[in-house]
Image (tube, grey):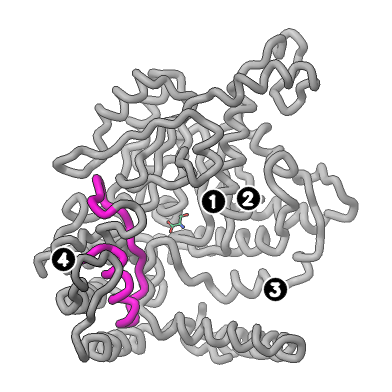
Amino acid sequence: MPAEYADTASAAYRAALQVVESVEPRIAAATRKELADQRDSLKLIASENYASPAVLLTMGSWLSDKYAEGTIGHRFYAGCQNVDTVESVAAEHARELFGAPYAYVQPHSGIDANLVAYWAILATRVEAPGLAEAGVKHVNNLSEDDWEALRHKLGNQRLLGMSLDAGGHLTHGFRPNISGKMFHQRSYGTHPDTELLDYDKVAAAAREFKPLILVAGYSAYPRRINFATMREIADEVGATLMVDMAHFAGLVAGKVFTGDEDPVPHAHVTTTTTHKSLRGPRGGLILAQPEYADAVDKGCPMVLGGPLAHVMAAKAVALAEARQPAFQTYAQQVADNAKALAEGFLTRGARLVTGGTDNHIVLLDVTSFGLTGRQAESALLDAGVVTNRNSIPVDPNGAWYTSGIRFGTPALTSRGFGPDDFDRVAELVVDVLKNTTAEGTSKAKYTLADGTAERVRAASAELLDANPLYPGLSV
Ligand code: DSN
């Protein structure tokens, strides 16, 4: 936030919170407390960030009150002229920022974006009997009789994605998500020695399984992906390449990932959230090649409820911010900081999955400290370090307790942290973990040595004070 806007933003928030307070004081109090808590903790959750006041303020408006099911210029409600403007501007920024022929900015979350994308791929790819002869463009326009014939085919398609313990996401065909029910799913993992993505194994799995959809992307893999290679694999077996760049969209937008590491020109369909490294409001968006655009555009009401116009407006503001040169500096700093954090762990003897990072994620194997991920996560939280536990490849502690802690640099980089600060963060994390002892055979209980939490909180406070969140903003 430019310094000259701090007073204006403070006045806006104070006024808004006073209005809220007059109706439900507990909500105003919780909102103020959330700001204080975020200011006072080392936020290292890889999927979180801090949106700018411009993005946040955009969401608090009467655009929220408008129903606008349908798409730009083709709504199921009257009076959507301003929502059309909002959605058009957001989509334009998305196309320009990512160099995509088509952008859809309605999805309410990453899960929703993936669901729309899956439906769009099925609708575009799965052939209905008599479809071409009847001149029907895709399955969204089928008659009921044709639907009956098609239902079985739609429910029998195959999806190949990265395994959960290698860093894939639930929506890539795993059972707790509808994608695991919709598709016959198979996973590719990482190399057992290097823990890196093994493209030969992905290709072999694709040749054997012959998926309709090859999914690339991750939420806990600390390395880059060669999307040109993934596209070659998809083309060889006739699969649609769908890339979920929810975690690293900011690194694509900020031109840290270019060429073969930029998914957008290689994927048929690219999905993302807007609130992680992209630093926008909570939500999703989809970029697509022209042959999939028509089906994606029917996302609402085919899959989604009415679009959130106030959030689409905030996406437009965030995407405009991401088109500024300063965002490229930010994105590069996110990657440089992750390297500094990884180096800080390695020099202090910790083991990292894949031995390091070249994106925004660092995945620490906490078994070398004699802890589960659950114990480490809780002990770190006691000391004011906010992270989340995560599986590591072939995790001996399963998906609930886990053996890893996932760290991400986007949020603290937004506060202004640099490589030296991240080295200090590594030192503090190692201090906590070395002073945490598992209780007996419990995978959850632990003891944190006396004085550790206080020592680490005091040291963190120095870092946080030197890099204030929303400087000048007072509510
Ligand atoms: N919840 C997100 C994450 O933490 O990576 C993914 O959905």
Please identify, in this view, whether the residue under mark 1 or under mark 3 is nearer the observer: 1
- Please, what is the three-letter code of the amino acid marked with disc 4? Gly
Residue hosting label 2: 107
The percent position of residue 283, horizontal first and vertical second, equals 58, 57
Gap between marks 3 and 4 measured at Cα: 47 Å
- Please, what is the three-letter code of the amino acid marked with disc 1? Gly
Please identify, in this view, whether the residue under mark 2 or under mark 4 is nearer the observer: 4
Point 21% across, 44% down: residue: 195
Residue hosting label 1: 110
| The quadrant where residue 74 appears | top right
How many residues crowd around disc 3 within 10 Å: few (fewer than 14), some, or many (20 or more)?
A: few
Q: Nearer the viewer, residue 254 or 458?
A: 458
Point 38% across, 62% down: residue: 46
Residue hosting label 3: 60
Residue hosting label 4: 370
Q: Of marks 2 and 3, which one's residue comes earlier in the chain?
A: 3
Specify the segment rendered in magenta: 369-397
Q: Of marks 3 and 4, which one's residue comes earlier in the chain?
A: 3
Q: Of marks 2 and 4, which one's residue comes earlier in the chain?
A: 2
Question: In the rendered view, does 126 fall on the left or right side of 438?
Answer: right
How many residues crowd around disc 1 within 10 Å: few (fewer than 14), some, or many (20 or more)?
A: many
How many residues crowd around disc 2 within 10 Å: few (fewer than 14), some, or many (20 or more)?
A: many
Gap between marks 2 and 4 measured at Cα: 42 Å
| The quadrant where residue 456 appears | bottom left
| SS for callout 2 | loop
- Please, what is the three-letter code of the amino acid marked with disc 3? Gly
